[in-house]
Amino acid sequence: MSNQMQNVVSKMAGKAAAAEAHFRGLRGVFTKLAEQHHAVATLLTRALHVEELRERNELWTEIRKELISHEQGELLEVYPVLESYEATRELARRHGDHANELEDAIADLDAIGAGAPAWKPALERLIAIVKEHVALEEQELFPRAQQALGDEAARQLEPVFLRAKEMAARAFG
């Protein structure tokens, strides 16, 4: 599958997740975060099945950039807000542990290299970490945060998050 087609498929998965999140009552930044979670999850799943090394490296570069810039946007703009609410403070703090685990798994994949036999098991570990991270956010944290912040604050936080994510993405080229 071409990279362009992969991007289309991942964006479609993301849009479907955003619609589902909206249906569940999430708004603004929380629907955007769900959209991005599911778009990158699609790319991660695809990476498991790519055998050609050049294509795997290109896909990994894109996945890495998306994961890190998404996480940086959350850490810089979303989680400081969530730590200020009693209803979300503890879950927001737990997020930091998940962020460290995610960064370690990304570093492991970088160190192993996409051509090594250990790369796929390390990718499977990253996928499991991402799934756990997404479950914590989308099932526990986002609903509480949506209730604590309200619709308007959630909407206002979205462009702030997107700017931070874009700045982080630019740092990766």
Image (cartoon, grey):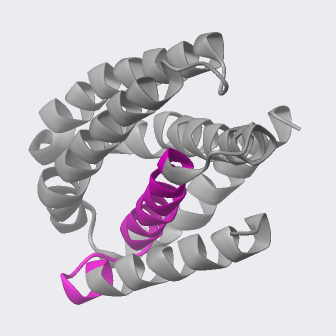
Q: Answer with the quarter of the image where residue 65 lies.
A: top right
Residue 105: horizontal and vertical position, in percent? 44, 21
Q: Looking at the picture, tell me which residue is in the foreground, 25 or 54.
A: 54
Residue 20 rendering spot, x and y as whole percentages: 28, 84
Residue 83 visible to the viewer: no
- Number of callouts: 0
Image x and y of residue 97, in percent: 28, 20
Question: What span is colored magenta in the figure?
Answer: 21-48
Q: Nearer the viewer, residue 72 or 64?
A: 64
The quadrant the C terminus occupies is: top right
User: Is 33 one of the magenta-colored residues?
Assistant: yes
Q: Nearer the viewer, residue 11 or 76?
A: 11
Task: Judge from the rendering whether residue 132 lies leftward or rightward of residue 50; answer left or right.
Answer: left
Residue at (78, 72) in percent of width and height: 4
Q: Residue furthest top?
A: 111
The one nearer the camera, 154 or 143, is: 143
Q: Residue at x 21, y 82 (%)?
A: 25
Residue under the image location 48 percent in, 18 percent down = 118
